[in-house]
Image (tube, rainbow, N blue to C red):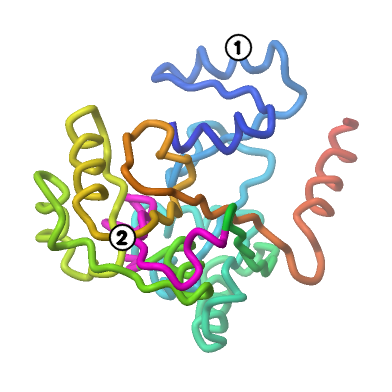
Amino acid sequence: REDYEPHLRIGNVVYAGVDYEKILREAEKESDIILWDGGNNDFPFYKPDLMITVVDPLRAGHELTHWPGSVNVRMADVIIVSKVDTACYSDIEKVIMNVERVNPRAKIITAAIPYTVDRPELIEGKRVIVVEDGPTVTHGDMGFGAGYLMARKLRAEIIDPRPYAVGSIKETYEKYTHLSQVLPAVGYGEAQMKELEETINNSPAEAVVLGTPTDISRYLKINKPAVHVYYELQEIGSPTLEDIIDELLERAGL
């Protein structure tokens, strides 16, 4: 659901399934433009007219080494270098140089990802437990996400979740030893959701900071207030993604 919810929130129609030929034919019946979303980092199962890949300078080097992201970088028409507002300049420069080396034809866009939070007063200066997107902070190799950055910005005291973890959540910490300051949302099924809920409720936090794409507090019975951190892409300079898409639509007569 997390991959679908940002689209549903803004009113987009989402098709999903396993037979991508049938999905495409159904989508073509009601759409002028079809957007393939790889969900995380998968390459498109359809041949695109415009392929866009996002790279992350907080994980500089992964654009060359990780599958299938490294394939996407080489195939892309447009590369968006994100998080330039939080990454260090040397890592931003490294990512751009890597992209230019393996895909010199790609147009490069730089972008910040500003983040906001509903009800900041609930976490400012408080003891909090931070829940982040599971794939990002586990096999994605990140130690934190937007929830952690917002908690730091509001001078919250961030609790180490590990002593309060149960079941598969505890096993996740044993497997991904780089995690210490955030709780990964790895609730894939009812049992794991209950373990995530129990881990949160076990902690002595005064509030929960949710950096997940979906507001998971709607699916868990949490015994403390929860706030949700939102983030959006903010392009810097030109060309913008809108400029590039407008060119494509003009060529297509749309």
- First in sequence: mark 2 or mark 1? 1
User: Which residues fall within the magenta stretch?
Assistant: 120-143
Front-most of residues 239 and 138:
138
Asked whether disc 2 touches disc 1, contact meaning CB atoms under 8 Å apart, the reply is no
x, y percentage for residue 180? 23, 69
- Among the 4 quarters of the image, the one containing residue 178: bottom left
Front-most of residues 37 and 162:
162
- Residue under circle 1? 26
Examine the rendered structure and indicate whether residue 19 appears above or below residue 113.
above
How far, Cα to Cα, is label 2 from label 1?
47 Å
- Among the 4 quarters of the image, the one containing residue 6: top right
Front-most of residues 94 and 145:
145
x, y percentage for residue 68? 38, 51
x, y percentage for residue 128? 36, 63
x, y percentage for residue 172? 16, 53
Examine the rendered structure and indicate whether residue 25 appears above or below residue 230.
above
The quadrant of the image that shows the N terminus is: top left
Q: Residues within 10 Å of mark 2 (few under 14, many from 20)?
A: many
Q: Amino acid at mark 2?
A: Ala
What element does badge 1 sit on?
A: helix
Residue beneath the point at 37% across and 31% down:
219
Q: Is residue 234 left or right of residue 194?
A: right
Q: Amino acid at mark 1?
A: Glu
The quadrant of the image that shows the C terminus is: top right
Is residue 217 covered in magenta?
no
Is residue 133 covered in magenta?
yes
- Residue under circle 2? 205
What element does badge 2 sit on?
A: loop
Residue beneath the point at 50% across and 73% down:
57
Q: Nearer the observer, disc 2 or disc 1?
A: 2
